[in-house]
Image (cartoon, helix red, strand yellow):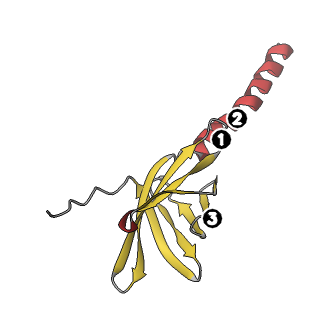
């Protein structure tokens, strides 16, 4: 009986970190939002989060209206409901809080002296059709 209990406790100890990591990494996929940079200019932003085979969060971002895609993210962390993203390529950071239902990030994009509200929801933006 004691041997079974010890085995069960050890099994839980090894499984618990994987379960936690999977729950924390559940943001994998595309998340979209719009930056209002002033003067009527709005920029559509998409983050593409992924989880490596080692369980580490990473990804890329797109600035749709600027035609910039695949911008590397140098750091992505999610602790409980707090997201922190860094992109050395554009010298920007994003800090946000995930809603209780896991469907919205409310946060701030910082780049240089600018601090702009950026709220994200799952998905991407539809392609704009060009007039011919």
Is the residue marked by circle 3 packed among few (<14), some (14-19), or many (20+) residues within 10 Å? few
Report how far apart the C-alphas of labels 1 and 2 lie in the structure: 6 Å
Label 3 residue SS: loop
Q: Mark 1 highlights which residue?
A: 20
Q: Quadrant of residue 114?
A: bottom right
Q: Nearer the viewer, residue 64 or 102?
A: 64
Report how far apart the C-alphas of labels 3 and 2 lie in the structure: 33 Å
Mark sitting on residue 16: 2
Residue occupying the far right of the picture: 2
* Above-or-below relation of 121 to 108: above
Q: Nearer the viewer, residue 51 or 8?
A: 51
* Above-or-below relation of 40 to 89: below
Quarter of the figure with the N terminus: top right
* Above-or-below relation of 52 to 120: above
Is the residue marked by circle 2 packed among few (<14), some (14-19), or many (20+) residues within 10 Å? few
Mark sitting on residue 51: none
Q: Mark 3 highlights which residue?
A: 88
Is the residue under label 2 in contact with that under label 1 (CB below 8 Å)? Answer: yes
């Amino acid at each position: 009986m004691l041997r079974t209990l010890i085995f069960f406790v050890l099994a839980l100890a090894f499984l618990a970190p994987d379960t936690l990591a999977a729950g924390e990494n559940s943001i994998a996929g595309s998340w979209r939002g719009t930056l209002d940079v002033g003067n009527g200019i709005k920029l559509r932003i998409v983050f593409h989060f992924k989880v490596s085979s080692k369980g580490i969060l990473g990804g890329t971002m797109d600035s749709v209206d600027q035609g910039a895609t695949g911008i590397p993210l140098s750091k992505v962390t999610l602790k409980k409901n707090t997201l922190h993203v860094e992109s050395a390529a554009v010298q920007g950071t994003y800090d946000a809080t995930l809603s209780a239902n896991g469907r919205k990030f409310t946060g701030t994009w910082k780049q240089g002296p600018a601090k702009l509200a950026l709220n994200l929801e799952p998905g991407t933006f539809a392609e704009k059709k060009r007039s011919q």
